Image: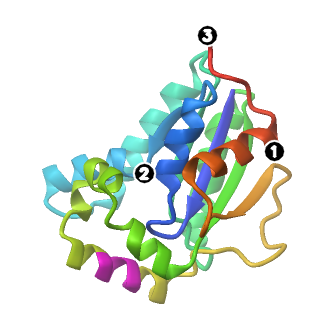
Amino acid sequence: MKLIILFGAAAVGKMTVGQELCKITPLRLFHNHMTIEPVLEVFGEFHAQAIRRLRDVFFEEFAATDNYGMVFTFMWDFDDPEDWAGVAGIADIFKRRGAEIYYVELVADQQIRLERNKTENRLAHKPSKRDLVASEARVLAEDAKHRLASRPGELPFENYLRIDNTHLSPEAAAQQIKAHFGFADPAQ
């Protein structure tokens, strides 16, 4: 089994690249908002503990299957020790089952990300982003408050790839990830 942890700043294209990667490999996509959106709907606000617990159920149950692997997407604040611990915890769930862990970081210029914040695909899968004024304000606030891109040499992982997808299509980014790590073709 493989776990691909696909991370980057808001609207960098994590979900869309993940969708494309799943089209060209046997990987399955578990994007961040698959747990965020139902929690927002039920609780009426962001409830971090509920989101973490839901994710852990998905991770534990998926890691116990015979699936080829999962792409998980999220934003990683590199200045937050809890985010580092969270990534290690997710990886450990899969490592205990013998999985290989891959880390893919996407980076893109803020202006491009603000444009991507309005795309039809993003809004279709992330209802909490449909208030475009509020969503853009969140992107800007997150950029100002958190360090969402790693520093050169900061990540110690053997299976790590950083892609600047500012001017790269999601399909091209997915092809680059697949080729770099040698992921399998989709099941026929």
Per the image, label 1 sits on a secondary structure element best described as helix
Label 3 to label 2: alpha-carbon separation: 28 Å
The image shows residue 4 at horizontal and vertical percentages of 65, 43
| Snapshot quadrant of residue 102 | top right
Per the image, label 3 sits on a secondary structure element best described as loop
Amino acid marked by disc 3: Gln
Query: Residue at point 74% right, 78% down?
Result: 151
Residue 124 among magenta residues: no
The image shows residue 20 at horizontal and vertical percentages of 54, 40
Residue at numbered disc 2: 32
Residue 137 among magenta residues: yes
The image shows residue 47 at horizontal and vertical percentages of 28, 60
- Of residue 7 and residue 78, the one placed in the foreground of this image is 7
Residue at numbered disc 3: 188
Q: Point out the residue furthest to the top here.
A: 188
Query: Residue at point 86% right, 52% down?
Result: 158
**Magenta segment:** 136-141
Estimate how packed mark 1 is, as few (under 14), some (14 to 19) or many (20 or more) residues with alpha carbons within 10 Å.
Answer: few
Q: Point out the residue furthest to the bottom here.
A: 144
**Along the horizontal axis of the image, is 25 left or right of 122?**
right
Residue at numbered disc 1: 180
Amino acid marked by disc 2: Asn
Label 3 to label 1: alpha-carbon separation: 22 Å
Image quarter hosting the N terminus: top right
Query: Residue at point 62% right, 30% down?
Result: 24
Label 2 to label 1: alpha-carbon separation: 24 Å
Estimate how packed mark 3 is, as few (under 14), some (14 to 19) or many (20 or more) residues with alpha carbons within 10 Å.
Answer: few
Which of the two labelled residues, at mark 2 and mark 1, occupies the earlier sequence position? 2
The image shows residue 85 at horizontal and vertical percentages of 61, 61
**Along the horizontal axis of the image, is 40 left or right of 103?**
left
Which of the two labelled residues, at mark 3 and mark 1, occupies the earlier sequence position? 1
